[in-house]
Image (cartoon, rainbow, N blue to C red):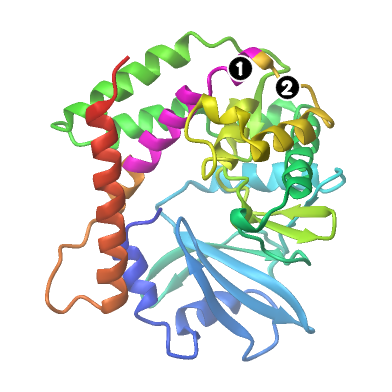
Amino acid sequence: MMKLSTMKKVADTVCEDWRSPVAVQIMKNWEYDEGELYYFRASANFVFLFKKEGQVYYLRFHEATEKPISQLESEMNVLHFLNDGPVKVAQPLLSKNDRYIEIVETDVGIFSAMVFEGIPGKQMETEELVEKQFYIWGRTLGMLHEKLKMLPLEYSSKRPSYTDHLHWIDSHLPKDDLPAREELSRIKEWASTLRKTQGNFGIIHFDFEVDNLRWNGDRIGAFDFDESAGYWYVADIVFALRDVLSNKEDIKKPQVRNFLSGYRSATKLDEDDLQQIDGFLRMHQLYTYTRIHRSADIPKSNDTPEWLSTLSGKLDIKLSFYRSRLCRLKN
């Protein structure tokens, strides 16, 4: 999640009709239907929806200092590799300058920007899914992993890994946050004991939850691969199901069983790794906790916009929830 100060800089330019002059400045590098560019959402990136010749596309950008260009280029390599795979993956579009990535100086800062094709289909909520759809969801992730297992080493080696995430947590956690730092030590020790093979470890999507999927009948398209990283494949299952999977006992839930059945129909599942669900959940929760902590960089004041006060309140609730869990955790 981006810093709230960054989010506010761009959000302050968004008008009541969801248009922004900052997005217009950035979109000068791509062709689009004039007047058809609207704010969509903001989390790790700003996302604007636009149309070109009536077709839907997405503009994605973030502050240029957030990620090195090399990381964005490696994401492009992964996307291009997946383009002929069994799962529809949103592909990037070249700019007028024949570049996939544009660095644009705007009135509120310098941003790294990319444009992606839209994927036809419907966005679903987890609670809307029926048993068959959990099976399809799992099968789709299994097909994606089966393809990613063939990703060339020169591509996979340039993506971040779980060790980079642990180092990032270490560098961004407050020094005096002892419960979180103790949990980090436990997770580092636990992760060091896990075996890594060509069959159980590689590049994962990292955020294969329903927000990043589009359903078109029995087929699912995926986007938002900017978090893709080197992990155990089981971690992708755990992270995708985190709304219904609170511990390894939840593997008995019908939704989880159907998801796993679908996954196994497309690729091999390491059953020993599946016993590590709790560890992967704790790793993701600590990573999320640290990201939220870093993002909350605006002090509360009387002139804070209502939307920002509401968001800050929600983040405070999440931080309190994670802190209470950290204080209760033991080996």
- Would you identify the image quadrant in which residue 250 lies? top right
Residue at image location 31% in from the left, 53% down from the top: 295
> Residue 296, position in %: x, y?
26, 55
Q: Amino acid at mark 1?
A: Asp
Q: In the displayed structure, does residue 38 sit left or right of residue 85? A: left
Along the line of sight, the residue nearer the viewer: 267 or 13: 267
Residue closest to the eye, 318 or 208: 318
Provide the major secondary structure of the magenta segment: helix
Q: Amino acid at mark 2?
A: Leu
The front one of 232 and 161 is 232
Residue at 71% from the left image edge and 43% from the top image edge: 77
Q: Give residue 227's quadrant in the image.
A: top right
Q: Which residue is mark 1?
A: 273
Residue tagged by mark 2? 269
Q: Which residues are magenta?
A: 272-289
Measure the alpha-carbon separation of dots 1 and 2.
8 Å
Residue 181's x, y, as percent?
24, 26
| Percent coordinates x, y for residue 81 in the rendering | 79, 42
Q: Is residue 12 magenta?
A: no
Residue 279 counted in the magenta span = yes
